[in-house]
Structures are given as structure tokens and as C-alpha cells.
Amino acid sequence: MNMTVAQTQRLAVSPYARRLARERDLPLSTLRGSGPGGRILAADVLSFVAISTHDIPPAAAPTIAAPRIAAFAASITLGALKDLLGAIEVLGKSLDFDEILLRAVGRAFAEVSDAAKGGAMALELAGRQAVFATVPEMPLTSLRAVRRAVLTDNRDDADKPAVLSLQLLPASDIRPLAMPLLPGRAMRLTISINTAGDHAECLLTIDAASVDETAAVAWFATLKSAIEHPLRLFV
């Protein structure tokens, strides 16, 4: 006779304990009885199961890498730009700050190529985005025509690739301190012109995992210089 079977037959086990052990697929030989003469009781089965479950370590929670976000702020003087736009208006032409800004963004990408690969940017509009290929050589008149055509179109380019998204906030004396990145954008530039119209408070937010911080600072400084010395954007 098999020794294991013989040993099981000699064990003193209550009927209820035997049924519990069978339901749990638990060999009686692994149990120690606490009843008279070492009889295995239902409590012995339940106690063994509870201890075994407690000893199983909980599953490790998945590790989620936190995004590496960096942000830089700057105040840009708009006096020279206001004077220049005023002089252009006297000549019977007009340009908006948005168009000058698009040109300045393209020029900054051209001069600081390490800031990001490519140079396409997304202009954030009401509930949608319009992606521009920021070519610094594009004449301002052409850029103006492209931008104004986009404003009359309802297409949303949120799924198109772009390095940077640009958000122009309503004029206010409240400066932005923190802004989240938009999906698929490694950089976000948020600009708020003060109520007097002579300064722009700017916040550049970047994904530091994909954009070098030093290059981003150089790009931001180039953009600031281009807006504060706007004549260079016309050549």
C-alpha cells in the first residue's frame, strides 16, 4: 500500500474539516490537528489557509515615470514693436502681433536649431489648433495671408505633429506661472500682454526629456530679442 495513502487514512479528521480541505485542494498531511489526539478540525484548515494567504506578498504596483517638466518665464518689452506697427499702419498697411510672433518663433527655431528638431508650431485657437510650418524666410505678407485664412477655417490640427504650441491669453496684468503641455507637443509658449500693451509676460514650458534645457533657454532668449528688436524680422 502507498505510504502516503496509509498515513492519510490514519489521520483523525472531522468530516467538516475533510470537506474544507478537499474544497481547497489542501492535502491533509500538511495540517496539524489541534483537537483531542491530534484530530484535525475545521479551524485547523481555516487557520492554515488564512496564514498562507497572508504570506503571499502583494503584487508590486506598476512604476509610472513622472514627466520631466521645466518652465522658464520672461517679460518682453513691446515698445519698439508698438512703434513699428504704428508706423506700418500710417503707410496704409497692417500687421497683427500674432503674425509678428509667428515670424519670431520661426526665426528663433532657425537660429537655435538644437532647441527642437523641426520647427512646426501649433497656434492655439478656441477649442482647436492650427499648425504652421514656421519658415523664417516666408514674407510677412504671406504669413499674414496664411494666418488669416486659418482663422476663417474650422479645421483642427491637434493631431498633426508640431514641436511647440502657442497660446495667447487675453490682455491682463496677471502673469502665467504654470501651464501644462498639450498632448504631442514638447514645448508650450504662453503669452499674456498687459493691459497697457507695453509688456508681454511669457512662460515657456518644455518636456525636458525631449528638449534640452540649455537649448530651450537659448531659444527663449532669441525669441525675446527678436520681438524687442522687431526690425530684424523684416529682413
Image (cartoon, grey):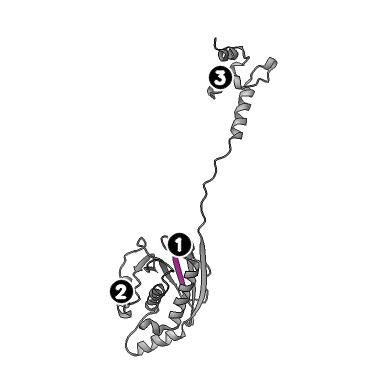
Magenta-drawn stretch contains 233: no
Separation (CA) of disc 1 from disc 2: 29 Å
- Within 10 Å of disc 1 (Cα), the crowding (few <14, some 14-19, many 20+) is few
Q: Quadrant of residue 94?
A: bottom left
Residue at horizontal 41 percent and vertical 70 percent from the top: 113
Residue at horizontal 57 percent and vertical 13 percent from the top: 3
| Total marks placed | 3
| Residue that sits furthest to the top in the current view | 1
- In the depicted structure, whether residue 55 falls above or below residue 138: above
Q: Please name whichever residue, 82 or 142, is drawn nearer the observer in this view of the structure.
A: 142
Magenta residue span: 184-191
- Residue at the spot of label 3: 19
For residue 210, the mark is: 1
- In the depicted structure, whether residue 50 falls above or below residue 162: above
Q: Please name whichever residue, 199 or 222, is drawn nearer the observer in this view of the structure.
A: 222
Q: Do labels 3 and 2 touch, CB within 8 Å?
A: no
- Within 10 Å of disc 3 (Cα), the crowding (few <14, some 14-19, many 20+) is some
Three-letter amino acid code at the position of disc 2: Val
Q: Quadrant of residue 226?
A: bottom left
Q: Position of residue 198 (x, y in %)?
A: 48, 83
Magenta-drawn stretch contains 189: yes
Q: Position of residue 160 (x, y in %)?
A: 35, 62
- Residue at the spot of label 2: 146
